Amino acid sequence: MALAETIVRRRAWLALGWLGAAVVLLPSASRIAQVLDVSAAVEGSESAEVERLLRGPLASAYARYAVLVIDSGPSPAVAAGDSVLGRAIAVLTAAPEVSGTFSFRNGRDSLFLAPRGGGTFVVIGLAPTEASADQVIPRLRVRTQGLQRQLRAQYPGLTLRWTGESALNHDLRASSNTDVVRAERRALPAIALFLVLAFGAVAAALVPVTSGALAIAIALGIAALVARIWPVSILLQSVVTMLGLGLGIDYALLTITRFREGLAAGLDSQAAAVQAARHAGHTILVAAATVAIGFLALLLVPLNEMRAIAVGGLLVTLTSALLATTLLPGLLVWLGPRIEWGRVRRRSPPRGATRGADRWRRLGLWVTARPWLALAGGGVPLLALALAAGGLRTGLPRGDWLPPAMESAVALRDLRAMGRSGVVDAVRVVLELPEGTSARRGVGWRAVQQFVEPWARDPRVERVRSLVAVVRASGLGRLGLATLSDRAVEGLVSRDGRWAAVELMPRDGLSPDSLMQLVWEIRDAGGVASGLNGVVVRVGGLPAFNTDYRDAVVGRFGQIAGLVILGTLVALFVATRSVLVPLKAMLLNLLSVGAAFGALTLVFQDGLGGRWFGVAEPLGAVFSTLPVIVFCMVFGLSMDYEVFLITRVMEGRRSGLDDRTAIIEGIANTGPVITNAAAIMLVVFAAFTLGQFLVIKLLGFTLAVAVLLDATVVRMVIGPALLQLAGRWNWWPGMKRRN
């Protein structure tokens, strides 16, 4: 009570503090995209180590590379095509970001001649720079766009497009950011309209929308400062926007509802604000703590994208909770009865917590009178849906799931049309020979040769680039090793011969699963395949990165889930002083998560209704990061609704109500708040399902299903039924029975 009174009494100072924070942070928030990292990385992974070795001992000009696809132009094997290729190479070699080019002009290799259709491509080495590789892509695009305009005067259909890991990374994150902005524009008007209808007044609707927008801006401003000293992925922007619209508005909604209840009960503005700060503030802080636990657990995953989601989620959750508990009560005092300004329907009667409370009271009466029937009717369908989650597979989805208009995706399709998409999926292997052994002589040469030959015969491999291939191309056999120039073997062997690089280009059309299997087989074979003891084999390239990315997430799912569950149980035990209530909440959360995963499996993985969401065919698998992100977010968001309900039931018990009456009144008072909050979340998440970025679409769908089921069937039917069945044991050992 003292804290609530202090917040209301010191409202002017708190408002000035928040105003100062906004003035300082909003400029940083407006420049957030300029400081966030657009690259993806698996910290400490084998693929990252290969990239480091290619930049270090092997000194490859193509340690980082991109692919320029020249489509609908003449073949480079004819004079006109050679001229086009030459002009493109001249433009690129003049760029400081380019360390080398590899094309048909380097030995007239048939690899650069499309067996299907026309066109060619150039492999572009990216020079070492402080900027990440995919930050360089926009600068190179400016150069080739100018050249394309010149060449189209002679070849109207000719296109120059960039693809490869760096270009795909850049475009995917830009596409994600575009989808977030569009989703925000779709969601905000719908949320505002919904709140006007729910509250029945324009002022009451605008306050939570403003609070949500301010939470997003301040969280992004803090994130921009964090990103200057600790690299954070651009995915943070998506998470902050998505959750800020949801949590920021939900927490404000709870505070305003409590304030309006106080006014309706005859309290003055200050007393009503104190009541709102006391009751809603405690609920919000407990709910925010449970959400924060999920994001803290994500910090265990050594991926910069997971770190971004964790940091963004923590910042916006904390900001939303603090705004609702410190700034909002004071603003409500100043607004007072003006919170009802702009009424669109008649004022709600004072009786009951909110409009429609009687309907929820009737539901509470029915559930508590027939708890076993309610439990079976609500629980059995959700259990059946959760069982479908047993078939969930993680990995890269099959088919063409990239956004159709994205340049790097279009260029990748151009390469597929040429039968050369394997260039982007090259597997890059580095062999570390024992101390004192050189790949340029004797046993070292034989070890590299023995390692390469089986993979060169593998039907999944189109081409192998290695020291062995260069020697054989010289026509001199092993004797040619001594005559090869450093330039001829650049990037394939280190100066001391201890490091050797082998690049395997897979055949066109291999599935993501097949590429991962190839990576696993090379790693399993290891140095033994070379026939020389002490050889260490490391595998990199895009397929290895995808493999490491998946393993980093999947391998930690159990640890993360355990931490989230344990942390949530502890937080709820501290808040409720009960053993049974936290256990019940945890089981219900697992049911919500399982049902959401089941819906994801059926709709997108198996294709039952995926076309309604713009996915033409079954994906066969979902992104590896998705289950971890969904679990952590849903567990926290679902716990919000549990906390909303259970705190009202506990208030009823403390006021002297019996168990059944306390449950009924808890449902009556929180039913409208929970469903309104969930409806806002549904609007936000549904807006994200309409975008082109598949991972955001799947995330939005899964979160929407989880929130819908949790706020209706789980919290309003199954949860109260379990409370009724447990009776007084719900509150053991912390609360004595009161009648």
Image (cartoon, grey):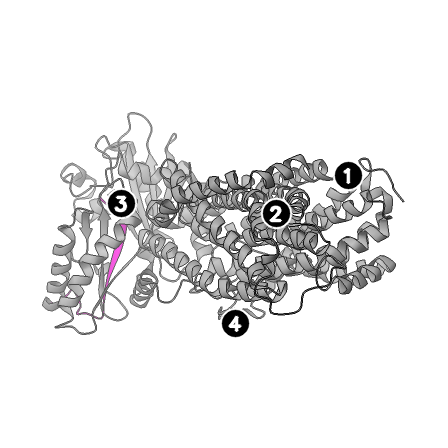
- Among all residues in the image, which is located at the extreme top? 436
Query: Do residues under tags 1 and 4 come within 8 Å of each other at their CB atoms?
Result: no
Going by the image, does 422 lie left or right of 305?
Answer: left
Question: Secondary structure under badge 4?
Answer: helix
Looking at the rendering, in which quadrant would you find the N terminus? top right
Q: Which mark is residue 158?
A: none
| Along the viewing direction, whichever of 318 and 500 lies nearer the viewer | 318
The residue labelled by disc 3 is: 466
Query: Do residues under tags 3 and 1 come within 8 Å of each other at their CB atoms?
Result: no
Image height check: is 488 above or below 338?
above
The x, y position of residue 369, in whole percent, is 87, 59
Going by the image, does 545 lie left or right of 589?
Answer: left
Kind of residue sitting beneath label 3: Ser
Question: Secondary structure under badge 2?
Answer: helix
The residue labelled by disc 2 is: 636
Image height check: is 347 above or below 38?
below
The x, y position of residue 403, in whole percent, is 40, 64
Q: Residues within 10 Å of mark 2 (few under 14, many from 20)?
A: many
Which of the two labelled residues, at mark 3 and mark 1, occupies the earlier sequence position? Answer: 3
The residue labelled by disc 1 is: 579
The residue labelled by disc 4 is: 611
Query: Do residues under tags 2 and 1 come within 8 Å of each other at their CB atoms?
Result: no
Going by the image, does 453 lie left or right of 248?
Answer: left
Which of the two labelled residues, at mark 1 and mark 4, occupies the earlier sequence position? Answer: 1
On the question of residue 298 being in view, the answer is: no
Question: Secondary structure under badge 3?
Answer: loop
Disc 3 and disc 4: Cα gap in Å? Answer: 45 Å
Which of the two labelled residues, at mark 2 and mark 1, occupies the earlier sequence position? Answer: 1
Image height check: is 424 above or below 522?
below
